[in-house]
Image (cartoon, rainbow, N blue to C red):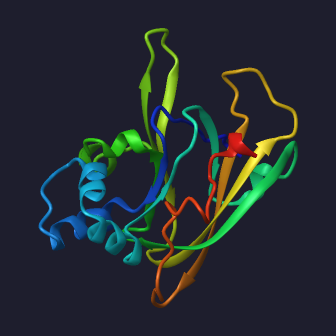
């Protein structure tokens, strides 16, 4: 299995279908590309985005490297499960979704997602090292309840290896019934360094 190691330079990870986000922005007459700012300034719009399954923000977390997997197969050996939070709404359009660093949403560059022939968004350091900001995954279009599972290595490895990781389980449903807000700090602790 190909290791998907994401480098977070901000304070969170998103899970989203870019096509669903674009539909949501158009329906709500939002032209700004500063997605995080839009949701921070308008709590009602933020809650509506969760209800409609536009995205799942996973915050706050440490700025470091994480292994990302669309299921728990990667974390069978050498990892310990730290938590499992269940049933977050996600509406997938065009049979794809992305998991990435919040930095992608500071000033959304739609072409990075829609015109990309790659299954990732990456950049190179001055040393020529490729770092990954987000990965694209394939999953049949539809509404899903998503479980987020956090893992920590049993024995930490030296940097730049990732010592934390997240996997995601998807359960297809017909309609959303309510929603959960992952930013409710009294209910959810996604920061794996705190375990």
Give the vertical position of 52 relative to 135 (above or below).
below
Left or right, 28 with reference to 24: left
Residue 81 occupies quadrant: bottom right
Total residue callouts? 0
Q: Nearer the viewer, residue 90 or 92?
A: 90
Q: Position of residue 189 (x, y in %)?
A: 63, 55
Q: Position of residue 144 (x, y in %)?
A: 52, 77
Please tell me which residue is depicted at 61% across the width and 33% down the height of the picture: 65
Please tell me which residue is depicted at 62% across the width and 52% down the height of the picture: 190
Give the vertical position of 128 relative to 120 (above or below).
above
Residue 116 occupies quadrant: top left
Residue 116 visible in the shown view: no
Residue 61 occupies quadrant: top right
Left or right, 77 with reference to 113: right
Residue 190 visible in the shown view: yes
Give the vertical position of 166 relative to 88 (above or below).
above
Give the vertical position of 33 relative to 158 (above or below).
below
Please tell me which residue is depicted at 53% across the width and 86% down the height of the picture: 173
Q: Position of residue 124 (x, y in %)?
A: 44, 20
Q: Residue furthest front?
A: 186
Q: Residue furthest top?
A: 127
Q: Nearer the viewer, residue 56 or 43?
A: 43
Q: Position of residue 87 (x, y in %)?
A: 59, 75
Please tell me which residue is depicted at 69% across the width and 45% down the height of the picture: 192
């Amino acid at each position: 299995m190909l290791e998907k190691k994401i480098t977070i330079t901000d304070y969170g990870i998103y899970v989203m279908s870019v096509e669903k986000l674009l539909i949501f922005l158009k329906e709500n007459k939002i032209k700004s590309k500063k997605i995080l700012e839009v949701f921070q300034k308008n709590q009602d719009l933020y809650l509506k985005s969760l209800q409609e399954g536009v995205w799942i923000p996973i915050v706050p977390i440490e700025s470091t490297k994480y292994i990302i997997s669309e299921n728990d197969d990667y974390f069978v050996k050498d990892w310990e499960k730290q938590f499992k939070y269940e049933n977050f709404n996600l509406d997938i359009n065009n049979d794809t979704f992305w998991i990435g660093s919040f930095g992608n949403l500071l000033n959304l560059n739609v072409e990075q997602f829609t015109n990309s022939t790659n299954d990732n968004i990456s950049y190179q350091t001055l040393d020529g090292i490729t770092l990954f900001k987000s990965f694209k995954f394939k999953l049949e279009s539809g509404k899903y309840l998503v479980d987020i599972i956090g893992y920590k290595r049993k024995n930490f490895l030296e940097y730049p290896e990732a010592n934390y990781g997240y996997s995601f389980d998807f359960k297809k449903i017909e309609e959303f019934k309510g929603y959960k807000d992952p930013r409710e700090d009294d209910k959810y602790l996604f920061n794996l360094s705190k375990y």
